[in-house]
Image (cartoon, helix red, strand yellow):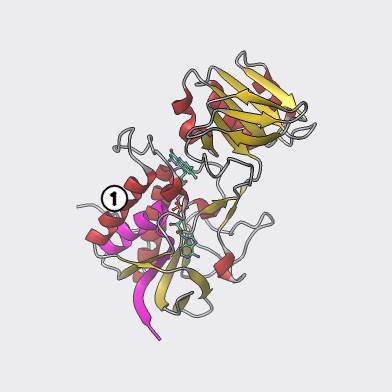
Amino acid sequence: MNTEHCDVAIIGGGPAGCSAAIYTARADLKTVVIDKDMHAGALGMAHIIANYPGMGAEMTGMGLLEKMRSHAESFGASFFKEKVNGIDVRHPEKTVYTTSGRMFKAKALILATGSMGKSGDLPGEKELLGAGVSYCATCDAAFYHGKQVAVAGRTREAVEEAMVLARFASRVLFFCPASTFTAPSEDVDRLAELDNVEVFTGRKVKAINGERFVESVRVSGPDEDIAVDGVFLYLTGSAPVLDYTGGQLDVCENGCLLVDERFRSSVEGVFVAGDILCKEVKQVVVVASEGCRAALEVERYLRGRDKPRQDYH
Ligand SMILES: Cc1cc2nc3c(=O)[nH]c(=O)nc-3n(C[C@H](O)[C@H](O)[C@H](O)COP(=O)(O)OP(=O)(O)OC[C@H]3O[C@@H](n4cnc5c(N)ncnc54)[C@H](O)[C@@H]3O)c2cc1C
């Protein structure tokens, strides 16, 4: 059986994993990054990333990911295209199993497999993702300057994201599928008071229409097509990708990993970074910084330092 030995194995090659790899490889730790598919993570799916410092307004998600990966490779990190389907973290040497049968043995692990936006199955949703369908107003609101958009959801996140959109869009139509919100009522009231926002309860977005871009949404109660340039969906939430951990790491009530302020999980030698951590803010710049922090902690752990080593000349 094909087994790779290394100092640190990073599971997930998104921005959190790549950033961690840059730091561990530069610290002269033998680093492998195991990633199932560059298109499978949030950054790989993102159309334009206009807010990553230094990259300008036209950078695509895949373009940024490729740059991050080559940067890590230039310092000696090795990338493997494999799907991880199990880990064994009961011993000082950790083992990572993949669906192809290849195994990795590492002195430390960084888990950076992100979170899965539980995408829904509205007609038109998949086809128009990135062409007017979005799950992130913080990321995409600026593309809707002066335009009419719809928001579907009932959570605090949906309401907060609609407030962000209201700063850009000419009109925000908020469709809450139920008669009540799960968001705090004072937040809903603040949203409804805005001049360019209309809040509808008990109306569901049933379909998204458009040829190449979103043109309208079909809503219920009564059924009608309403013209919009974009639709922001907050109907299904997201969950951390942990299926391969086999319950070996402690999680809290909401199913998120328990991690301390130094990005250490409940098992010694296993560190965690990125959207897998169930945070309120999901942004590339944030997860890149977490990858850095986790990597510096790995170096501290493996080399027995009191403090993390600063990585500068
Ligand atoms: C549509 C969209 C638009 C966005 N726009 C912006 C934006 O404009 N600006 C911004 O800052 N942020 C944006 N974001 C958020 C940003 O992309 C994420 O916060 C960020 O990518 C999270 O990084 P990550 O490394 O934690 O996870 P991800 O980017 O999700 O990477 C996780 C990686 O883990 C791998 N993986 C998962 N499971 C396994 C497994 N079992 N085995 C091996 N590999 C595995 C995946 O292949 C993937 O490459 C957007 C997100 C989406 C979905």
Is residue 159 visible in the rendered image? The answer is: no
- Left or right of 116 in this view: 66: left
Q: Which part of the image, by quadrant, shows the N terminus?
A: bottom left
Q: Quadrant of residue 122?
A: top right
The residue singled out by tag 1 in the image is: 67
Residue 70: x and y, percent?
A: 26, 56
Q: Quadrant of residue 253?
A: bottom right
Q: Which residues are magenta?
A: 1-26
Residue 88: x and y, percent?
A: 52, 77
Is 271 inside the magenta-drawn segment?
A: no
Farthest bottom residue in view? 1
Q: Between 242 and 47, which is closer to the camera in this rendering? A: 47
Q: Residue at x 28, y 58 (%)?
A: 72
Q: Between 221 and 284, which is closer to the camera in this rendering? A: 221
Is 6 inside the magenta-drawn segment?
A: yes
Residue 233: x and y, percent?
A: 60, 37
**Classed neighbour count for the residue bearing mark 1: other residues with Cα under 10 Å, few (<14), some (14–19), many (≥20):** few
Residue type at mark 1: give it: Lys
Q: Residue at x 54, y 32 (%)?
A: 210
- Left or right of 142 in this view: 299: left
Q: Quadrant of residue 177?
A: top right
